[in-house]
Image: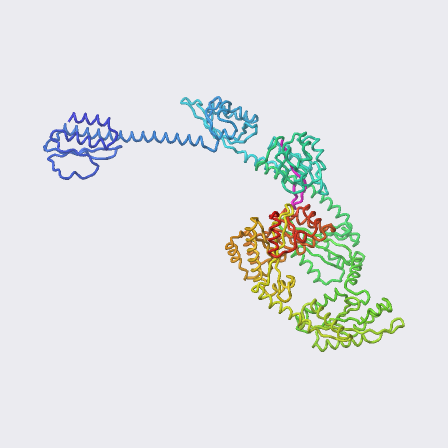
Amino acid sequence: MYRALSEINQAIIRISNEEELFPLVCRIAADLDGISMAWIGVADSEPEGHQPSATAYFPIQRNGQPFGVLSVYHEVEDFFDSEMTGLLDELAQNITFALDNFDRERERRGALKALRANEQHFRAYFERSMFGMAANSPDKSWIEVNQALCDMLGYTAEEIMATTWADLTHPDDLIGNNALFQQLIDGSIDELSVEKRFIQKSRDIIDVHLAVRAVRNADGSLAYTVSLVEDISLRKLAERREKMRRRTLEKVARGGSLKEIMLQIIKSAESIYPKSMCSILLMDHEGKHLLSGSAPSLPDFFSRAISGVKIGMGVGSCGTAAFSGQRIVVENIASHPYWENFKELAATAGLGSCWSEPIHSASGRVLGTFAIYRAEPSFPDEQEISLIENAANLVGIAIERIQAEEELHLASSIYHNSTEIVLVTDTNNRVVALNPAFTKITGYTLDDIRGKDPSLLHSGRHQADFFQAIWQEVSRQGFWQGEVWSRRKNGEAFPAWLTVNVIRNDKGETQRHVIMGSDITNKLRSDELIWRQANYDFLTSLPNRYMFQDRLEQEIRKSLRQGSLLALLFIDLDHFKDVNDTHGHPVGDQLLIKAAERINGCIRGSDTVARMSGDEFTVILPRLANTIDGEAVAEQIISALAEPYSIDGETLYVQASIGITFCPGDACEAGQLISNADQAMYASKTSGRNRLSYFTQSLHDEAQNRLKLLNDMRSAVENRQFELHFQPIINLTTGNVSKAEALIRWNHPERGMISPAEFIPLAEETGLIVGIGDWVFREAAAKAKRWCELFNTVLQISVNMSPVQFQSDALNMTDWLAYLQALGLEEKHLSIEITEGLLLNASDGVKDKLLRFRDAGIQVAIDDFGVGYSALSYLKRFDIDYLKIDQSFIQNLETEQNDLVLSEAIVMMAHRLGLEVIAEGVETEAQCRLLLEIGCDYGQGYLFSRPLPASEFEGFLTTSVFPQL
């Protein structure tokens, strides 16, 4: 047993796990004389098939907890005496020791493995960290640095190791940093965190956040330090820009002069970027030249040389920025074309690059430029761009504040020197202030009416509800304007044109009412004369055609509203020209006066007689019982006018031809009624004169013509009577054909070629335009596909679309896009042209269709731009790609300066909004040259080509794209 125990103890030393130990122990024990079996198990059951005479169990523990049992079986019943039991128990304890030792060994190996893993993780973090990391000895020399720190400072690891921490620290931070490091050495602190500045290899300064932890020896002395370095340059730059902004606004608020404010902004900017030389140039009052504002770091000769420079494209960085309203970055002055005329000056001043930002007012007007110069060619990064923008914005605020103060001073001068009255009341409508003009016009001084209600000025000509309505409007809208009869201090009433405004505080509460106005006594007299001249015939004192038009429209509305009958007579004196030719115009004028009197004598007080022109008169007869009543008045007028005229001793005879039309039977629109009556009057003349004719047949004939045209149009697509002509659109810069407009033509089998101006309006009225437009789109797409493949070029075909198409539910854009896909044609080869009117009151459905075109990649152009409403707001709300300047501007481009200026304004506005411009109706080389000079992108017109049938246009492309063919 002792031998067995010895063998087992040696095995415990040699073996490292229980899987090997347990079988060995059992085998050695079983080899003892008489022991039939030894078993170690952690289960509660015994081995099957054994029924020994003696059995002994010895517990085995692991880590102080029951783990298993050593079971020994013997054939001899009293084998397990005290000595044997003791030895076996010792064996069980040795096994327990071995198990605990196995566990400790596993833990040790696990700890070693984890330690190696942690070391690998730390090394990976150290080497791959985005933050700079380093270890330094107590003398501040470098023990180890990672690549991130090298990249941050611009050195290689070997270069950094040859320096000390202090060598790379900004001089202004060195004393404070040394004091903190000394505390680490002394042991008063174990870690520190500080923001500081390092000097990069390029000599640029970098801001960092530094975190340092001390690693100490057993005796507490400093062994080395471990540092984590984070680049915080972006944050510090933002803080410095914010500091610049705050200090500038404080100076603005304290009323600093513009010169002081500009100098402070420049010094702040140059402190943020020490290599910079900043300059501020201010726009003159004409908006054409830049004047020196502030540039303390630039040579004086340079500042003097550029002060007064005229702005324009290519005039240096600042002149171009001020002219274009956009930032101009010139990386290398010596090679940039914008500096062609200033290269020698810049070289003498030692300037290598210039970045210029326009200074804008709140309304977008250019006030000047803020520029940064560098000695070496360089390009700004995002932070430098941000600084330029912030500085320009601050200068703009300062300039506008100075201008506001000047305007305030001017307003005060105007207040005291204006010829218009100004009266100010408080929230209770009590007078608190007035200007000298008020005293001059009304006779009241401030002492006379201070604290009183302005109602003391009432003349008595208006009822109380008139003034109640005024103040209700002021309360609701904050504004009222109109004519009021007022009273002077001497009691004299006079007419005044008044404007009432409300001044509110930040909370929207009323603080003051400001009443401004003028004495319009003389103006009323003048206006009355002008109004009469504008609305009455000077010879007969009858209403002229303008007043007649207004009266007719009013009476039509009444007729339709009341369901009554209205007649319109058109009267022409027969052979009146003979009277003028024979007796002279003075006699003719007298005859016209007498004729007007006779016509007036035939009508009711509610009727209207007007002189249209020459010997033509019109009569409006409202509220007739039937057409016979109108005919009776006309016959009476014919009889009255046929009576002889006695003028200057001469007896003259004149007759009249009259045409009559009725509302609502013939028409319900003023223009149509006038046309109807005019046609009927000519029918009377052609029928022998001195008679009355009704309007009937001409209206019938026109309706029949329209109906026939409409019926023919319904089958025109099916019978292939429509065809497309194409007019090229030329890139004015390159002279190449870039686009073409598809124009529909109707080749009628009987009438020949019918103008679109004749059939398109009818198609729109009837809705046929939707089907016709669908044919046009598909035909244009097919042609675009053919020509793009044939000529291997990017050609875009534009298709005109009617507002009716957009408003129709029958327009199926999904089918159009599917058709393009089936053709294999990219959407960029098609564009649509719409009119301005479509966008002014666009419904949600119209907006959705426009957006679908945009999303599909089909571009949109505004046709005939400039002759309609030209509302600019829709250019922001809708995704427009092109503006087409109407040909009415282009026709007189060479002779009418206004047309040229307007065209240039349209081009500049479009380009600022990111749009391109096409000029329509280009017919001469001179027009083309002027358009090119103002920056127009494309031209279209007879100078290049008339609209061509598809086959001829294909030939045109052949000679244009491949002139050698």
Dominant secondary structure (helix, strand or loop) of the stretch shown in magenta? strand
506 displayed left or right of 687:
left
Q: How is the image coloured?
A: rainbow
Count of numbered tags: 0
496 or 114: nearer the viewer: 114
The picture quadrant where one finds residue 542 is bottom right
359 displayed left or right of 847:
right
Residue at the image position 69 percent from the left and 59 percent from the top: 470
Residue 639 position in % (x across, y down) = 79, 77
Residue 371 among magenta residues: yes
The picture quadrant where one finds residue 122 is top left
Q: In the orientation shown, which residue stands out farthest toward the front?
A: 965
**Depicted 153 relative to depicted 683: above or below:** above
**Depicted 844 relative to depicted 14: above or below:** below
Residue at the image position 51 percent from the left and 54 percent from the top: 821
Whether residue 27 is visible, yes or no, is: yes
599 or 207: nearer the viewer: 599
Residue 735 among magenta residues: no
The N terminus appears in which quarter of the rendering? Answer: top left
Q: In the orientation shown, which residue stands out farthest toward the right?
A: 649
99 displayed left or right of 458:
left
Write the start and end of the magenta stretch as one range: 359-374
Whether residue 844 is visible, yes or no, is: no
728 displayed left or right of 586:
left
Residue 466 position in % (x across, y down) = 71, 61
Residue 215 position in % (x across, y down) = 43, 26
Residue 279 position in % (x across, y down) = 66, 35
